[in-house]
Image: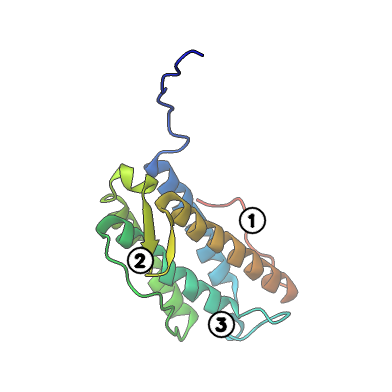
């Protein structure tokens, strides 16, 4: 049997392209937050799901802290915290985007292949953890779309990530 030589494969996506993809999702989720009536963002529910404002607070508690943890190895305790208004949520959302980019630039590329424990409780490959944060945002944003439609509000196009 012939000996096989390891062949380097190009990355499917670069860290910078992944960040751009993620920030595009975050811009779209921001539009969903904006579309909610103030009096429904933290109160409206369907079928036992949480209000979208609570879901968005969860996303905030994961995004910049994930980038920070990957860059520094220092992990915050996961804590969504209470947010009192749509304006406060949007302000915190807007503040988190540059923080994500700042920490992202400090993540060594090899870190994405390492097994880490984020937030003191989730162990797995770093790239998987980033993808989980993105997938979780898409999942909750979809719940927000259902809420908006049930409220008679047309949500932003799902592909509008600019």
- Secondary structure at numbered mark 3: helix
Q: Disc 1 marks which residue?
A: 157
Distance of label 2 from label 3 (alpha carbons): 26 Å
Position in image of residue 22 (x %, y %): 46, 53
Distance of label 3 from label 1 (alpha carbons): 21 Å
Q: Disc 2 marks which residue?
A: 65
- Secondary structure at numbered mark 2: helix
Q: Disc 3 marks which residue?
A: 38
Picture quadrant of residue 155: bottom right
Residue 98 visible in the shown view: no
Marks 1 and 3: in contact by CB < 8 Å? no
Position in image of residue 98 (x %, y %): 32, 59
Q: Earlier in the sequence, mark 3 or mark 1?
A: 3
All told, the count of numbered labels is 3
Picture quadrant of residue 154: bottom right
Position in image of residue 115 (x %, y %): 38, 53
Position in image of residue 48 (x %, y %): 69, 82
Mark 2, Cα crowd under 10 Å, few <14 / some 14-19 / many 20+, is many
Q: Residue placed at 68% from the left, 73% from the top?
A: 147
Distance of label 1 from label 2 (alpha carbons): 28 Å
Check residue 68 in the rendering and tell me which mark sits there, or answer none: none
- Nearer-the-camera pick, 48 or 100: 48
Residue 62 visible in the shown view: yes
Question: Is 6 situated left or right of 150 in this image?
Answer: left
- Secondary structure at numbered mark 1: loop
């Amino acid at each position: 049997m012939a000996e096989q030589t390891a062949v380097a494969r190009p990355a499917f996506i670069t860290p910078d392209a992944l960040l751009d993809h993620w920030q595009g999702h975050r811009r779209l989720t921001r539009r969903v937050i904006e579309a909610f009536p103030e009096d429904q963002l933290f109160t409206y529910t369907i079928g036992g799901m949480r209000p979208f404002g609570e879901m968005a607070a969860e996303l905030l508690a994961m995004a910049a802290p994930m980038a920070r943890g990957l860059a520094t190895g220092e992990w915050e305790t996961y804590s969504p915290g209470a947010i009192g208004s749509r304006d406060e949520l949007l302000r915190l959302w807007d503040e988190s985007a540059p923080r994500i980019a700042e920490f992202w630039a400090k993540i060594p590329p090899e870190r994405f292949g390492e097994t880490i424990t984020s937030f003191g409780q989730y162990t797995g490959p770093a790239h998987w953890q980033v993808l989980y944060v993105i997938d979780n945002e898409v999942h909750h944003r979809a719940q927000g779309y259902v809420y908006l439609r049930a409220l008679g509000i047309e949500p932003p196009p799902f592909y509008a990530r600019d």
